[in-house]
Image: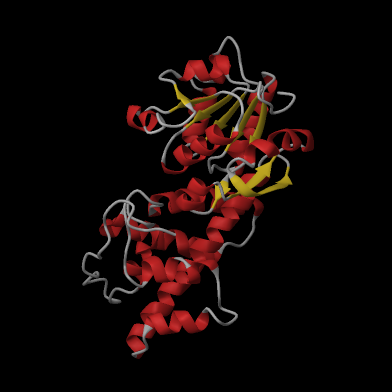
Amino acid sequence: MTEGVSEMTTIGFIGLGVMGGAMCRNVAAKHPGRVLAFDLSPAAREALADSRARPVADVAEIWTTADIVLLSLPGGKQVEAVCLGPDGILSASRRPGTIVDLSTTSVATAKRLAGELGKAGVAFADAPVARTREAAQRGKLSIMVGASNPLFSMVEPLLGYMGTDVMHVGPVGSGQFVKLVNNALLDVNVIAIAEAIGMAEKAGIDPAVMIEAVAQGSGDSYALHHHAPKSMLPRIYPEKSFPPEYKIKDLSYLLELAASLDAPARSMELALRYYEETVSAGFGGRYFTAVREIITRPRDGTGVADTPPGTQAGALRE
């Protein structure tokens, strides 16, 4: 395990998507040492050309050069492929001392990776991030970390480059559990808001007025302040944000865990069905709040709402 983070520490960053690119840019701006950045997409690498990060075209250079590697990938399959696949860290002649996974995966995946990498002398922490793309750009993410106490103490300053709220929530796997619960609570809340909007419309009450009033009471929430007025009421569901496919992935991870624990999760099961319907109805790739269109459509399933405005990429700013 790397002894500490200093100007002599070389950081590798793999995965330069919507969130990863912004996080890597912050790391490069704040870390006094070298930062190497890799993504399969040449365009994603090129987007960091104006930063202090040095894009590399071969992931092997990350493995053989970096001391600590940060991952920001779509899900567990991609993380496992990067770590354990033919070109993964175990295939390298020289390996980094620590892997910190900022992706959202299953708890089981985090524990499996920690075990496999640990056998090769590589420390592993799961540190999924929460909040929006704008928060990633501003370095104000919430980061929930599953790691041993010594490893958390070592990586906490590095995570502080990307987040304002970095919390050690337990051993490996705990970060993923807390992140999945965070996402599920938001998902269920968004569905309840969509149902309330549909009822308000049928009752002849202005949904915007309802949202404003409820936000002053005990029904207030982050989703009510942000998702309702910025997306659900104006029906703006841009592409290249957080699509319902990601909600399906994350809810599936949590429901698999709930089943293994014999723990009730009926509200989350309902949320999963709604987001699956959202994709089936043609809103795949759009912002996940498009679930509002599924919930407020006529009960016979016909007449899905007209194509909403704001479909351009990046239309939503939270």
Q: Height in image: 188 above or below 165?
A: below
Quarter residue 262 falls in: bottom right
Question: Is 139 positioned to the left or the right of 16 in the image?
Answer: right
Q: Residue at x 29, y 73 (%)?
A: 297
Q: What x and y, as percent, mark residue 41?
A: 35, 29
> Can see residue 27?
yes
Q: Residue at x 66, y 52 (%)?
A: 261
Q: What x and y, as percent, mark residue 268?
A: 52, 61
Count of marks placed on residues: 0
Q: Quadrant of the N terminus?
A: top right
Quarter residue 66 falls in: top right
Question: Is 60 positioned to the left or the right of 294 in the image?
Answer: right
**Of residues 168 and 263, which is closer to you in this image?**
168
Q: Residue at x 26, y 57 (%)?
A: 311
Q: Height in image: 96 above or below 283?
A: above
Q: Height in image: 95 above or below 260?
A: above
Farthest residue in the top direction? 93
Question: Is 86 positioned to the left or the right of 117 in the image?
Answer: left
> Can see residue 86?
no
